[in-house]
Amino acid sequence: MGRPPQELFDNGLALICAKDANNHYHYANSRFIETFGSPDGVTDADLFPAAVAGRLRQHDAQVIASGKARLDEEHIPIDDEDRVYLFNRFPIAASDDGPVLGIVAFEVTQRARAEENLLSSRALFEGILDIAADAIVSIDEQQRIALFNQGAERIFGYRACEVLGQPLTLLLPPSMRPMHQRHVEQFERSGGAARQMGERGGILGRRKDGTVFPAEASISRIERDGRATYTAILRDVSVQQEAERSIQALNIDLKQRAAQLESANRELEAFSYSVSHDLRAPLRSIDGFSQVLIEDFFESLPEEARDSLRRIRGASQRMSQLIDDMLTLSRLTRGNVTRRDIDLSAMASAIAGELQADQPDRAVTFQMAESVRAMADPHLLDAVLTNLLANAWKFTSRHETARIEFGSAIDAKGRTVYFVRDDGAGFDMAYADKLFGAFQRLHARDDYSGTGVGLATVQRIVHKHGGEVWAESAVEQGATFYFTLE
Amino acid sequence: MRPILLVEDNPDDEKLTLRALAKNNIQNEVITARDGVEALAYLFGDGNQPAPAMVLLDIKLPKVNGIEVLRKIRQSDKTKFVPVVILTSSKEDQDLIAGYELGANSYIRKPVDFVQFTEAVRQLGLYWLILNEPPR
C-alpha cells in the first residue's frame, strides 16, 4: 500500500492535528485551519480563550503522560457561540522533536444540545410526577408496576421500591380485581388512547395497611415498539365523599329545622290571632261594665268609687293598647324584607304632615333633608320613620316650640347613617341600653304616653335589614336616633 | 220595622251591644244568634221570617263561623242585599279580606273603650238603618 492521499485528511468532516510535548502544532488539516485558524507557529493560548486553552492543554498532558487514548467533549466558542467537539486524543510514538499527540475531532454541538434538552425535560417530567398530589402509576404489559410517583406513595402508603415490578393487583382490593380485568380488556379492544374511570365513584383502591378507599382515575395507553404501557392518574376521593355526605346530612338537618321553624311560626301566628281576639273580649267586658256602673249608678256612687271605676277603665284600655302594639311588633317582624329603592325624604315629610294635622296647634319646625333614598322594605321603613318621628313629636310636646330634623350622613366606615333629631326632653344616656327593649319606658306615663314598643319595633326592623340603631341624648338637650341599613 | 240580627257568642258582648243600641234609641227588635248555626236557622229556617234590616256579625263563632254565614247570606236571593256589618275583635288581614271579598258592607273592630263602642253603634244605626237606602 502506498502513502495515504492528502484528500483522506482534508476532505472529510474530521478536524485533524498533531502536537508536540510543548503544545506546538506540527500538523493541522484544512478543516482544522478553516475552523480554528492556522496553528502554524502558535500555541492553543493564541488560538483560544485562556480557559479553553488551559483545559485543552490539561487533557493533552494526560494523554501524553498516560500514553492512553481518550475521548472528551470540548466546549469551544466560535463567534461567541458555544460549540461542542468530540476530541479523540491518542499518543504518537515520539521521534526527535516530533509530535507526540494526535487529535481527531468532530463537531457534535447539535447532538449535545439534544441530549441537554432531553435531560432537562426528563427533570421537568420527574419534578411534575413528584409534586403531583394524585397518584401516577404505570404498568407494563404484564400488569407489573413500572412507575410509582410520590403522590402514589402518599395515597397507597407503599414506597416506590416496595412495589416496582410487583403486580398491579397489589393496589386493588380483591373485590375490584375482576372489574379491573374487564376494564383492561375493554380498553385493549377499544383501541382508544385515554379514558376516564370512576367518575361516578365505583373505583376502589387498597392501601398498604389494607384499608380500601374510593377513587377517581383516568387511564392512558402509550404504545412503543409494539408494547403498551398503561398509566393511571388516580385521586383519593374519600375526603371529598365524606364532605359530600356531611353536606347532605347538614342539608337534611337544615330542612328539618326549617320545617320546625315554619311550624313554630304558624303556631305563633295562631297564637297572635287568638291573643288579638280572646284577650280583648274580657277587656271589653271590664271596660264596658265599669262604664255601665258609672252611667247607671253615678249619683249613688261615692267619688272614690267613681275614681276606681275610671282607673279600671284606663287600665283595660292601656292593656288593649299593649296587646295591639305587641301584635304590630310581631306582625311587622314576621314577614320577609322586600327591598326596593325608596324615597325616605318623601316618606318622612308625609309622616310629619300627618303629625302636624293631628295637632295643628303645636309650633314645630320640620327640617327634612332632600333626596334621601334607601334600598329597603318600604312598609317596614315607614314603621321606623313613623315611630322615630312620632317619638320626636311626643318628646318635644312640653316645649313651646320645637325643631325636628331628618337627614343622612356618611360615617367613617363609609356607611350611610340616617338620623332623626329633636330638641325635646331627651334622656339620660345612663339608661341608653334600656332604650330598645320591648315595654321599656324611660319617662313616667303621666308625662308622656306610650307602651314602650315603638323603639323595640324600630330596632327589630333595622336588624332585619342588617343595620344598627343607636341614640345620643342628654336630659332636656334633645335626642338623636341614628340607624344604618346594610 | 224589620229586626236587627245580632250574631254574637259572647254574652257580655251581647249585653253591651244591646245596651249600646238601646242607648242610641234604635227601636228595631234585636234577634240574637249565639253561633253560626242559629244565625242560619233564623235566616233560612221554616219560620218564614222577613229578612233582617241589618246583620251585626262576629267572625269567630262556634260551629259555623261568621265568614261562612256571610257567604250564605250573599248566596240567597232573600238576603243578598241585607247590610252586613262585621263586628269583631280581629283585625287580621285574612279576616278583613275574606269579609270584603264576600261582600260585607262594613268591617268594624270593636273598641275596648265602651264609650267609643257606643258611639260606633250609634253611627252604624244612623247610617245603615236611616241614611242608607236599600233596594225594595
Image (cartoon, rainbow, N blue to C red):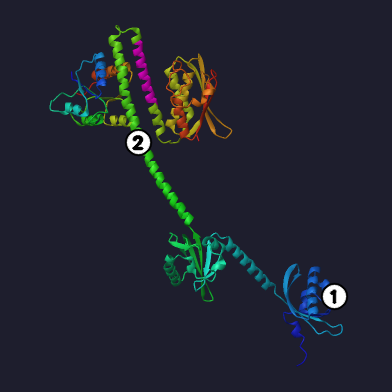
Queried whether the magenta region covers residue A227, the answer comes back as no
How many marks overall?
2
Q: Earlier in the sequence, mark 2 or mark 1?
A: 1
Camera-side residue of A207 and A244 = A207
Q: Are marks 2 and 1 in contact (CB under 8 Å)?
A: no
Query: Residue most toward the bottom?
Result: A1
Residue type at mark 2 is Arg
Circles 2 and 1 on the same subunit: yes
Camera-side residue of A1 and A200 = A200
Q: Is residue A155 above or below residue A192?
A: above
Q: What span is colored magenta in the figure?
A: A306-325
In the figure, residue A333 lies in which quadrant? top left
**Magenta: predominant secondary structure element?**
helix
Q: Is residue A227 visible?
A: yes
Quadrant showing the N terminus of chain B:
top left
Residue type at mark 1 is Val
Q: Secondary structure at mark 2?
A: helix
Q: Which mark is residue A266?
A: 2
